[in-house]
Amino acid sequence: MELRRILFSGATLCLSAFGFLASAQDCILPSLRVDGRYLKDTHGNIVNLHGVMDTPNPYFNNYRWGNRCDDSTVDDCLDYFDKIFDAVTDSTQGAWCNIFRLHLDPCWTNDPKKPMTGKDRGEANISRYSRARLEHYMQSLYFPMAKSAMFHGLYVVMRPPGVCPETIQVGDEYQKYLIDVWDMVSSDDSIKKYCGQISLELANEPIRCLDSEGKDSPAALHDFFQPIVDKIRANGYTGVLWIPGTGYQSRYESFATHPIEGYNIGYAVHTYPGWYGADDKHCNEEDFIKQWGKQVPVVDSNPILISETDWSPVKSTGPDGKTRNFGTWGTASTSKWGKAFKAVLDHYGNISVTLTGVADYIDIDTFLVHKKVVPAFGGDPECCAKACFDWYADYAKVNRPQPDFKYRRTADNGDGTFTNPLINADFPDPDIIRVGDTYYMVSTTMFYFPGATILKSKDLVNWAYCSNPLKQISNSDPFNLVGEYNHYSKGQWAASLKYHNGKFYLHFVAFSKDKFNDGGDFLLTTDDPAKEWTMQKLDGFYYDSGLLFDGDETYIAHGIGDIFITQLDDNFKAIKTEKVISVGNGCEGSHMYHIGDYYYIYATYGGTEGSQTIFRSKSPFGPYEEHEGRIFEKQHIHQGGLVETQTGEWWTILFKDAGSVGRIPYLEPVKWVDGWPVLGNEGIDVSRGGAKYKKPDVGCAYPKAYLPTNDDFNDKVLGMQWQWNHNPDSSSWSLTENPGHLRLYTASVTDKFEQARNTLTQRIHGFYSEGTDAADCPDSYATVCLDISKMKNGDVCGLSVFQDPYAFIGIKKIGGKKRLYYYRSAYENHKTTIPHVDYLGEPIKGKRIYLRSKVNLATNKVNFYYSLDGKEYVPFGEESKMRFTLKIFTGNRFCIFNYATKKTGGYVDVDWFSTEL
């Protein structure tokens, strides 16, 4: 089986309705999130869900499990819904539900001892609401029911108890009620734990919404629901929130101009026959699509959940002359209104659906008595049940969520704390800034391009790629790997990242190679860090620099051993330079700040025992005094930047020298004492021994984030986890010649892997935290699937682990035969040269080969494997050791390569790359 299919459609461990088998108690549905106008899984696949709603209420459940709502009937109620979940997910009998809308029915949350007051009737009356009962039945009924649903493969949408009164108003009692309900629900640790699987629909069927002055206003819906959203986020719930509109959830025009702010926002809509100008008599598909989009314009910006819909045609006419349908809220037929309704779903492509009740989907009693799952209403094709049986089965074949990756890590512990490292991968020399509520971190990438990687975060703990702004430094022979030339250990060094007057600035230096004069001092600028940056070469050479925009003045701190301050004009030309610090000992990595009364130079003492230091002065040109003692001494943590959160906290991100994985970023708190920053736990890493530490207060909780590693090469651009070793030859690779594959042509002729152009690399990630014993550190894997049918004689392709030494497993075509090939480079060890090792294996007859590397970042061991079928992997080559050496000066990387030893012209197609096992 293709790993592309099991990687991204994943583990068949828990698949049923689309599907997930109830095969293990810890079977967890893939996490879902909002990305633009779509609901997506963690792989970026578009997901639309299809299912049913129900409410644990004796009356609405036809008293099948009892007639009381108290502790005595909880078990019977749960048992009943277990059976319902069995039925609606039994794909062997044609049921394909994967979402359940759960009403937190007020029959459980209302206190019968309280008197009913107020003018609102029925479920709109909240006078008997009891938070204590909501908390109690959340633990004993609602969450166990939700967990059972998830166990059956159903995502859960929780709807609050009851329905909205005829009019709701900003600041009224109903808004306060909803805030209290969702405060309790979103504070529940179990709900937060499953925030990728349990979403919240904030209200049911608002009719009219007024602003705080009792007037109709386009901002009223926003002002009513935004405080509820903010409360939920403040409690740490980060999952999807479904926002209702007015008109019984049919009017959303005001959200087009006053959208709900924040992340993971969708809108919950109701759609019944007769609404949106459509019924059996008016069922033109184009008209329905147009009117539905007019009333729900947020369909163009956010995912939609149609959380109620049903229909059935007229079945009979009573003696009173009134027509009756099959028992649904809506009256229409599938061949008319239903056909047009499906056209709406398919036209917009981002709409999930739950039928109004289980009885709209299956014949409940037939299942309970005979264990047969059949459509409700006798399977009449004009009713919603039979239609949805057919539609759901078709939809289950596409746009379905895939299991989360197993091999991934975040510093976020999910309980409001974090444990270092921030990212267990090579992101050295970090500098950090905040712009509004977004944090940006730049790192050193040296000779990898596109480079100067920038990450972004909302909470300083969970990071995502923003851009690789540096396309190239020079088109010189060393940067192009011509002949024997290269720029290993050189290229882009220690950047300074700043934001000033609406523009982002990124400064770095690069060392020249011999006669080529291909280095210098460079400045990148942009208005949007995720888009194109403009590069200019500056005069001077400001080593390990720290830019400071200070009012109308601009300064830059730079140097090693001796630290200088240079004042720059508006064109970044030097006005004057003065030596301000002379301490030797490799003091470098300066970042400059003006905080309060002082100018600070935040610097590092380098070497194998790197530590942090700080100097301060009341003038940018000194005199500077140094803080007593070295910070993080003998902990290998040093060099980085300071940042203030929007709530006034201070934090620093530094890197730790972590061996073969590289230099990895650590987050440490900062408190100010007598004008000096005190870092970490009085100079000790707050995660020492694996300890947890409270996450930064940024005013809101944000979801966990994971940097991507896997790739099926379906996009038209390379993911930002990828970088080329030196400048690529852009004419020798393609993502479009064979869509769904990366085509790598041989771009150079060489007998040295390290001189091969178009070697594609990414950082190796460790999947463990600070304090993990070496024996408990899991292996990291890379597997690549290659089509090798178009290789030419002398070509070598494969998968490498690259530093000094490097090793690879590959295919070498010799004498018309493609043979397995292992190579480990020579290297120096204590002034002794360890010779290289290489040998050939058996010929490979097929067109496809699977190559795997297993590395352990604690033991530094590397092993290689191959497979002919993608299932059974056979060891090949020797076990080798990884190191971190200054000869390369970056962490070890996984590499995909294809080079010629005789003549260019051959190519391989890379089908997929995975860090899963």
Image: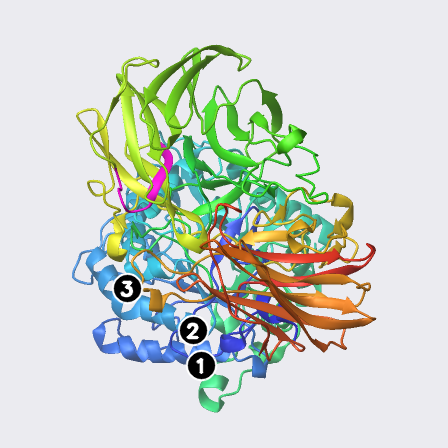
Query: Is the Cβ of the residue at disc 1 closer than 8 Å to that at disc 2?
Result: yes
Observer able to see residue 724? yes
Q: Which residue is mark 2?
A: 27
Q: Quadrant of residue 908?
A: bottom right
- Please give left or right for residue 795 compared with residue 664 in the image: right
Q: Amino acid at mark 3?
A: Met
Q: Which residue is mark 3?
A: 138
- Please give left or right for residue 759 compared with residue 878 in the image: right
Boundaries of the magenta span: 631-643
Q: Quadrant of the N terminus?
A: bottom right
Observer able to see residue 206? no
Magenta-span inclusion, residue 551: no
Residue 401 vertical placement versus 703 (above, below): below
Q: Secondary structure at mark 3?
A: helix
Q: Quadrant of residue 361?
A: bottom right
Front: mark 2 or 3: 2
C-alpha separation, residue under disc 2 versus residue under disc 3: 21 Å
C-alpha separation, residue under disc 1 versus residue under disc 2: 7 Å
Sequence-earlier tag: 2 or 3: 2
Sequence-earlier tag: 3 or 1: 1
Count of numbered labels shown in the rendering: 3
Mark number for residue 709?
none
User: Label 2: few (<14), some or many (≥20) within 10 Å?
Assistant: some
Residue 717 vertical placement versus 24 (above, below): above
Who is closer to the viewer here, 763 or 292? 763
Q: Amino acid at mark 1?
A: Ser
Q: Secondary structure at mark 1?
A: loop
Mark number for residue 23?
1
* Residue 769 coordinates in the image, percent (x, y): 35, 57
Which residue is at 70% across, 34% downward? 475
Q: Amino acid at mark 2?
A: Cys
